[in-house]
């Protein structure tokens, strides 16, 4: 079930950004004609990546906004599209998500389309220091990157932790996230967890942004589930790659990767030193003590790994 931890960072569009957004979702907003037969893909920021790899000339899937961006009018438009669609591919979404009728069951109730559920994918094995969480009453993200480093967070809370994990602990963090994925997919139509049986650096850019090594085989499984003989569409570019987290030496060792360690972040193609991110986040935690308290409580299992390392 997706929640606010699974969504990407969003900024309310204004002015020209509104027009650009409407053009981006032209078919959804009626600015371009809909295909004669079409499906829709619903969910968080991962949904568009999945749509890209299952969309094809003989099986069109209309681009729709991620559910965490939708307004009430857009939710009504989504209902209309779902009613006309032949297929709805969706992540599990709880009823009345963000007080709008965007739940998977609510969409299924208004359409005769086939509904196929796919779990949201989170994998921490490549970034065992990282968390993507939100805390009620703290709507903003920290500066530079919208992710939290458990070491910086622990420092803000006065909790001593290791500077790095041994490879066995890295694998344990990864396996814990796969266990969680198995729990999520148990109620879905498409299985994802075994795609991590062999891990590469392309499996995840951040904890909640899978790479093409996941999207292409996952797209193939969705198409197979739908009885579509075509293979997935290779987008010709890395998906969900606007933010890339550092890749530590112990992570490379843990998964026997061929990659070179990288200590910096890459955001929209620009290198950002991890030291700068840490300093900015320390200041942010000082200004948001309630977040630190809540986050330490919610991240207790991950924090315990780093305390015991």
Image (spheres, rainbow, N blue to C red):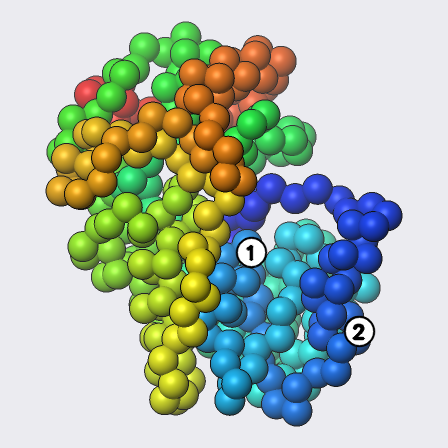
**Which secondary structure, mark 1?**
loop
Residue drawn at (35%, 75%) of the image? 220
Q: Quadrant of the C terminus?
A: top left
The numbered dot on residue 54 is none
- Is 216 rendered above or below residue 167? below
Quarter-of-image position of residue 260: top left
Q: Using the numbered discs, state the Cα–Cα distance from disc 2 to disc 1 in whole angstroms.
A: 23 Å
Q: Is residue 165 left or right of residue 280?
A: left
* Residue in front for this viewpoint, 143 or 182: 143
The percent position of residue 192, horizontal first and vertical second, equals 32, 63
Q: Secondary structure at mark 2?
A: loop
- Label pair 2/1, CB-CB below 8 angstroms: no
Percent position of residue 184, x then y: 38, 58
Given the current orientation, which residue lies at the most extreme right position? 15
Q: Residues within 10 Å of mark 2 (few under 14, many from 20)?
A: few
- Of labels 2 and 1, earlier in sequence is 2
- Residue 223 visible, this angle: yes
> On screen, 209 above or below 88?
above
Q: In the image, which is nearer the foreground, mark 2 or mark 1?
A: 2
Q: 43 or 95, which lies in front?
A: 43
Where, by quadrant of the figure, is residue 197 drawn?
A: bottom left
Question: Relative to 4, does residue 231 appear above or below in the rendering?
Answer: below
Q: Badge 2 is on which residue? A: 31
Residue drawn at point x = 70 percent, y = 42 percent:
11
Q: Is residue 71 visible?
A: no
Q: Residue lying farthest top?
A: 158
Query: On the image, numbered disc 1 is attached to which residue?
Result: 44
Residue depicted at 22% across the width and 50% down the height: 199
What residue lies at 62% left-to-right and 69% top-to-bottom? 63
Q: Is residue 280 left or right of residue 24?
A: left
Residue 18 image point, x, y percent = 80, 53
**Position in image of residue 299 (x %, y %):** 40, 30
């Amino acid at each position: 079930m997706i929640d606010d931890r699974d969504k990407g960072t969003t900024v309310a569009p204004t002015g020209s950004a509104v027009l650009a957004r409407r053009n981006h979702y032209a078919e959804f907003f009626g600015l371009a004609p809909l295909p004669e037969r079409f499906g829709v893909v619903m969910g968080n920021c991962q949904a568009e990546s999945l749509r890209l790899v299952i969309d094809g000339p003989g099986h069109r899937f209309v681009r729709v906004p991620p559910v965490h961006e939708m307004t009430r009018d857009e939710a009504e438009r989504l209902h209309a599209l779902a009613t006309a669609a032949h297929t709805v591919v969706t992540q599990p979404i709880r009823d009345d998500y963000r007080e709008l009728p965007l739940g998977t069951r609510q969409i299924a109730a208004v359409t005769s389309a086939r509904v196929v559920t796919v779990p949201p994918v989170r994998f921490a094995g490549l970034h065992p220091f990282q968390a993507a969480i939100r805390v009620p009453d703290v709507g903003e993200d920290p500066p530079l990157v919208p992710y939290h480093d458990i070491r910086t967070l622990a420092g803000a809370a006065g909790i001593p932790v290791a500077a790095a994990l041994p490879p066995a602990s890295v694998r344990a963090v990864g396996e814990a996230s796969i266990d969680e994925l198995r729990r999520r997919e148990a109620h879905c139509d498409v299985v994802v967890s075994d795609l991590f049986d062999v891990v590469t650096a392309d499996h995840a850019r951040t904890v909640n942004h899978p790479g093409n090594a996941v999207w292409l085989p996952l797209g193939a499984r969705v198409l197979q589930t739908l009885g579509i003989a075509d293979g997935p569409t290779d987008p010709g570019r890395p998906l969900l790659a606007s933010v890339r987290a550092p890749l530590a030496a112990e992570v490379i060792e843990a998964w026997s990767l061929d990659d070179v360690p990288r200590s910096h972040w890459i955001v929209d193609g620009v290198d950002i030193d991890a030291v700068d991110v840490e300093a900015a986040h320390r200041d942010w935690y000082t200004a948001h003590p309630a977040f630190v308290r809540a986050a330490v409580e919610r991240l207790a299992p991950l924090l315990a790994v780093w305390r015991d390392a």
